[in-house]
Each structure stands twice: as structure tokens, then as C-alpha cells.
């Protein structure tokens, strides 16, 4: 299989582990021969909530939004409340418009299926833009109530049923009507479990276990909810 392209988008005040946990795990898949990761942000340098500064690979702008089909996976990290709320308020900005556009891309076959993965409070952005309409989702436990408000507001605007916020390390809510896989993780370190789950989806469980072993991480793979398909309302613990 050819290298899969991952787009990871940043905003001022992002959490470093929300970025670096998934980055390292996905980068190590299949001995580094699975994914090519590209970091995008609206500014050349983006400062994390912890003070670390990350230089982007490419600009997050209208040109990137126009070429989103080049990316197989979109990873959206989170951060603390105020920076996330400030970014989510910019619904007409490139960052939020990109998040709204990605789940509408669709795919030609199951083999080409795209994945949208939110990490921690990155789910607030997806919830604001209606990505979780009529879907299960999760986020950091401190932000459950905020995400509930966001999904209810988004659903009210469009007449959809609001998403349902659940407590889990990660939630695979299945494939949307356009054929995009929607996955959300719980707080911070949960993004590592969700990223290993993405490797499992793409390359099988042995590949995910191998990465967990390489980074000496105890993968909590049985603590995520997996929706069987778009119409299934019950969830089961992933095996």
C-alpha cells in the first residue's frame, strides 16, 4: 500500500500531547512506511498552551481546503477551554471551514475511505460545525457539558438530531453519509489509543500492537466504543 497522507491542523493554544501523541504513533506505523504527516496552521509559527512553538509545513488557507482530497486522514487536536472557544468562534475562518469541508469529501470505495479524527477537546470544533449530528462522540471529561451544548446548537440550526456525548477512551461513530469515518478521542492521552485504533483499521491489529510495543505504551484498546454502522444506535466495546 502506498503512503497514506495525514493532515494535522494546529491553532494557537493547542495541547502538545494532543499533537505529539498521535504524531509519533502514526509516524511509527509499519516501521515508518505507512503515513506521511503534514502539519498545517494559519500562521507560520503556532504556540502551544505549554509554550512550545511549532513551525508549520504548509499554510492552512483556501488553497489547502480546495485540495483536501489529497489527504486520507485529518487529525484535529484540542487544548484548554479559552483557546478552543476562541478558535471555535471563528466559524468563517479557514480552520473551521476546513473541518466542515473534510467530512463532505466522500470516497469512491471502502478502500479509499477517509478518516476524521478529533483528539480531546478538538471535538468541540467538530461539534460546533455539525460533524457529530446524530452520532456518538466523546471529548475530555471536563468538556462533556460544553460538547453537549455545541452538538445541540449545531443540530438545532440544521434540523438534525444532536450528537450523543459518551464517556470513552475513543468513539468510532462509523461512516457518515458521504463515506467518511468519524472518530473522536477522550482527553489528551486517549488520543494515543485512538491513533492506535486508526492503525488497526488501516493495517490490522498486529501493526497497532507493534507500535504500542515500540513506544512501551499499554494500549487501552477495549475502552473505546465502536458503532457497527451508520444506522446502528447501540455501541459495543471494541475488541
Image (cartoon, rainbow, N blue to C red):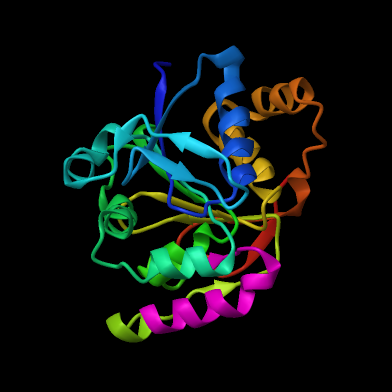
Q: Position of residue 118 (x, y in %)?
A: 51, 53
In the rendered structure, the answer to whether residue 121 lies left or right of residue 130 reads right
Q: Write down the quadrant of residue 71 in the picture.
A: top left
Number of numbered markers: 0
Task: Classify 103 as above or below 130.
Answer: above
Q: Who is closer to the viewer here, 130 or 141?
A: 141
Q: Who is closer to the viewer here, 48 or 219?
A: 48
Is residue 74 visible to the viewer in this orientation of the structure? no
Q: Position of residue 216 (x, y in %)?
A: 81, 27
Span shown in magenta: 135-154
Q: Write down the quadrant of residue 60 in the picture.
A: top left
Q: Position of residue 90 (x, y in %)?
A: 31, 67
| Residue 148 within the segment the image draws in magenta | yes
Instruction: Give the main secondary structure of the magenta stretch.
Output: helix
In the rendered structure, the answer to whether residue 115 lies left or right of residue 60 reads right
Q: Who is closer to the viewer here, 216 or 58?
A: 58
In the rendered structure, the answer to whether residue 146 lies left or right of residue 142 reads left
| Residue 239 within the segment the image draws in magenta | no
Task: Classify 160 as above or below 174.
Answer: below
Is residue 220 visible to the viewer in this orientation of the structure? yes
Q: Position of residue 17 (x, y in %)?
A: 64, 43
* Image quarter (top left, top right, bottom left or bottom right) of the C terminus: top right
Q: Residue furthest front?
A: 51
The residue sitting at 54% across, 47% down in the picture is: 48
The residue sitting at 35% across, 80% down in the picture is: 160
Amino acid at each position: 500500500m502506498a503512503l497514506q497522507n495525514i493532515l494535522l491542523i494546529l491553532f494557537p493554544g493547542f495541547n502538545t500531547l494532543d499533537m505529539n501523541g498521535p504524531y509519533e504513533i502514526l509516524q511509527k506505523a509499519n516501521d515508518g512506511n505507512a503515513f506521511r504527516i503534514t502539519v498545517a496552521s494559519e500562521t507560520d509559527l503556532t504556540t502551544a498552551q505549554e509554550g512550545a512553538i511549532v513551525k508549520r509545513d504548509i499554510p492552512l488557507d483556501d488553497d489547502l481546503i480546495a485540495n483536501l482530497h489529497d489527504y486520507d486522514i485529518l487529525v484535529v487536536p484540542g487544548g484548554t477551554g479559552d483557546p478552543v472557544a476562541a478558535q471555535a468562534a471563528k466559524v468563517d475562518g479557514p480552520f473551521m471551514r476546513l473541518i466542515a469541508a473534510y467530512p463532505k469529501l466522500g470516497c469512491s470505495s471502502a478502500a479509499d475511505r477517509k478518516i476524521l479524527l478529533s483528539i480531546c477537546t478538538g471535538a468541540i470544533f467538530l461539534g460546533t460545525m455539525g460533524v457529530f449530528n446524530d452520532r456518538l462522540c466523546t471529548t475530555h471529561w471536563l468538556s462533556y457539558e460544553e460538547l453537549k451544548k455545541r452538538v445541540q446548537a449545531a443540530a438545532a440550526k440544521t434540523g438534525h438530531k444532536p450528537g450523543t456525548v459518551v464517556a470513552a477512551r475513543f468513539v468510532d461513530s462509523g461512516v457518515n453519509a458521504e463515506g467518511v469515518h468519524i472518530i473522536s478521542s477522550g482527553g489528551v492521552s486517549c488520543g494515543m489509543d485512538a491513533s492506535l485504533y486508526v492503525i488497526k483499521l488501516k493495517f490490522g491489529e498486529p501493526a497497532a500492537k507493534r507500535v504500542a510495543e515500540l513506544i512501551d505504551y499499554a494500549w487501552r484498546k477495549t475502552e473505546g466504543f465502536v458503532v457497527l454502522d451508520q444506522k446502528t444506535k447501540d455501541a459495543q466495546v471494541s475488541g
